[in-house]
Image (spheres, coloured by chain):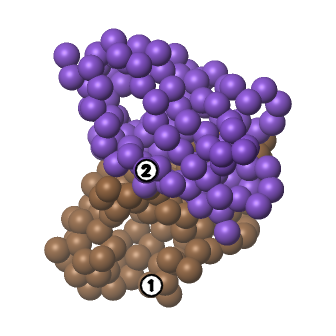
Chain colours: A purple, B brown
């Protein structure tokens, strides 16, 4: 069965600092990997996705993620965060027709 | 592209009552998914449709839950005899084909509170 682990429940960073959110997945074959962001009371917005090819993928809002098969990881990064990045971030894996999400990481930005 | 629309945004009901939620997907999308999200958790898969056919149901979807997509367009999710444990955000999502080709587009959800 596919699964996703996001080890950090809550992260706080200063505005302008760099960010890395961790994601580890479990899936028997090559997975399709996603990062979504959710603002309070809202649905989920796709930040980026990995299907194949280049292991470093670029997304919207200046985010990027790197797929590392040897570590079963798909960490999300941003070089300089903005106050508007405060939200909940979900990593997800799909090998068939449905997404399996992690429990999320809540990002707080301090001035 | 008007996005995925869900109605209502909020629903408060008493335990034992029935509730129905509606989802209107992006018009050309043939896949429609229902997820449930509780506080502090990621969304959990409930069921999905391809056109009007319901192709998979999660074990989370008890007999009190039923979903339909009668004409392959909008979908409804009904919960009968609601319980307090049903309180959650119910998210609908749609995609053009399978997940691999077309990522899910989510609506803003329906927040259900059972008192």
User: Residue A7's mark?
Assistant: 2
Image-quadrant location for residue B11: bottom left
Q: Which residue is painted at 33% across and 12% down in the image?
A: A16
User: Residue B64's mark?
Assistant: 1
Residue A17, compared with residue A91, is above or below; it is above
Is A102 displayed left or right of B30 in the figure?
Answer: left
> Callout 1: few (<14), some (14-19), or many (20+) C-alpha neighbours within 10 Å?
few
Image-quadrant location for residue B10: bottom left
Residue B36, compared with residue A107, is above or below; it is below
Query: Looking at the image, can residue A79 be seen?
Result: yes
Q: Give a yes or no on whether discs 1 and 2 share a subunit.
A: no
Rendering coords of residue B42 (x, y %): 44, 55
Identify the chain of the residue marked 2, using the numbered disc in the image: A
- Rendered-image quadrant of the N terminus of chain A: bottom right
Q: Which residue is painted at 32% across and 56% down in the image?
A: B40
Rendering coords of residue A109 (x, y %): 26, 25
Q: Secondary structure at mark 2?
A: loop
> Callout 2: few (<14), some (14-19), or many (20+) C-alpha neighbours within 10 Å?
some
Residue A101, compared with residue A65, is above or below; it is below
Question: B67 or A71, which lies in front?
Answer: A71
Question: A69 or A78, which lies in front?
Answer: A69
Rendering coords of residue B112 (x, y %): 30, 63
Discs 1, 2 touching: Cβ within 8 Å: no
């Amino acid at each position: 069965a596919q699964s996703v682990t996001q080890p950090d429940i809550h992260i706080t960073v200063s505005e302008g600092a760099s960010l890395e959110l961790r994601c580890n997945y479990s899936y028997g074959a090559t997975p399709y990997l996603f990062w979504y962001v959710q603002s309070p009371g809202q649905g989920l917005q796709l930040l980026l996705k990995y299907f194949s090819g280049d292991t470093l993928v670029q997304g919207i809002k200046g985010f990027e993620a790197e797929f590392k098969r040897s570590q079963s990881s798909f960490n999300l990064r941003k070089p300089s965060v903005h106050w508007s990045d405060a939200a909940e971030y979900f990593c997800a894996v799909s090998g068939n027709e449905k997404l399996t999400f992690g429990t999320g990481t809540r990002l707080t930005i301090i001035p | 592209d008007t996005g995925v629309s869900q109605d209502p945004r909020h629903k408060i009901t008493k335990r034992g009552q029935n509730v129905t939620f509606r989802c209107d997907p992006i018009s050309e999308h043939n896949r429609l998914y229902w997820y449930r999200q509780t506080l502090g958790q990621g969304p959990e898969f409930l069921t999905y449709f391809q056109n009007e056919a319901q192709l998979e149901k999660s074990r989370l979807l008890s007999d009190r839950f039923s979903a339909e997509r009668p004409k392959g367009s909008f979908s409804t999710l009904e919960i009968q005899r609601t319980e307090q444990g049903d309180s959650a955000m119910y998210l609908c999502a749609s995609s053009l084909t399978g997940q691999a080709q077309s990522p899910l587009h989510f609506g803003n959800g329906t927040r259900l509170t059972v008192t």
